[in-house]
Structure formats: structure tokens, C-alpha cells
Image (cartoon, rainbow, N blue to C red):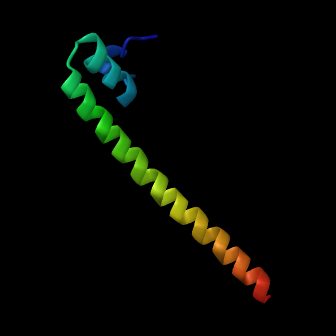
Amino acid sequence: MTLGGPANSSQTMLTYLYFNGAERTQFGYGTAVSVILFLISFVFALAYQRYALRRDTAGALTRAVG
């Protein structure tokens, strides 16, 4: 809506990816940004999954023993 706002203050990685990859036709640069975005999301998802599995496993073991 704000097209990045003043000095690109409201631009996210996804809108940055779209602007550079599609509108400016810099496909290689857009692809590089998308790979970095994927890696950040993947690391966050793995960390969350590890946290959730540890929490669920710890709860299951204490309930079975107690």
C-alpha cells in the first residue's frame, strides 16, 4: 500500500524479493534473496520443531512415571 514507505521503512523481505525479481527483472538477485529467505524460515522451523518435540516428550515422560 505504501510502496515501501518513506526510505523503504515498511518493505519486508517478500516485497523486496518481488520488487527486485519481477519488476526490475533481476531474476538472479531475486532468486538469491528467495534462497536466503528460505534458509531463515527453515532454521526457524527446525528450532521451533525441536522446542515443541522436547516439550511434548518431557510432558509425556513425566506423566507416565508420575
Number of marks present in the image shown? 0
Residue at 44 percent across and 52 percent down: it is 44
* Side of 17 where 45 appears, left or right: right
Query: Is 29 situated above or below 54?
Result: above
Which x, y percent locates residue 64? 78, 84
* Side of 63 where 57 appears, left or right: left
Q: Nearer the viewer, residue 21 or 11?
A: 21
Which quadrant of the structure image shows residue 6? top left
Q: Nearer the viewer, residue 62 or 22?
A: 22
Residue at 20 percent across and 27 percent down: it is 29
- Image quarter hosting the C terminus: bottom right
Which x, y percent locates residue 61? 70, 82
Residue at 37 percent across and 15 percent down: it is 5
Which quadrant of the structure image shows residue 58? bottom right
* Residue at the outermost bottom position: 65
Query: Residue 12, can we see it?
Result: no
Query: Is 7 situated above or below 29?
Result: above
Query: Is 41 situated above or below 59?
Result: above
Which x, y percent locates residue 37? 35, 38
Query: Residue 21, can we see it?
Result: yes
Which quadrant of the structure image shows residue 20? top left
Residue at 60 percent across and 63 percent down: it is 52
Which x, y percent locates residue 31? 26, 30
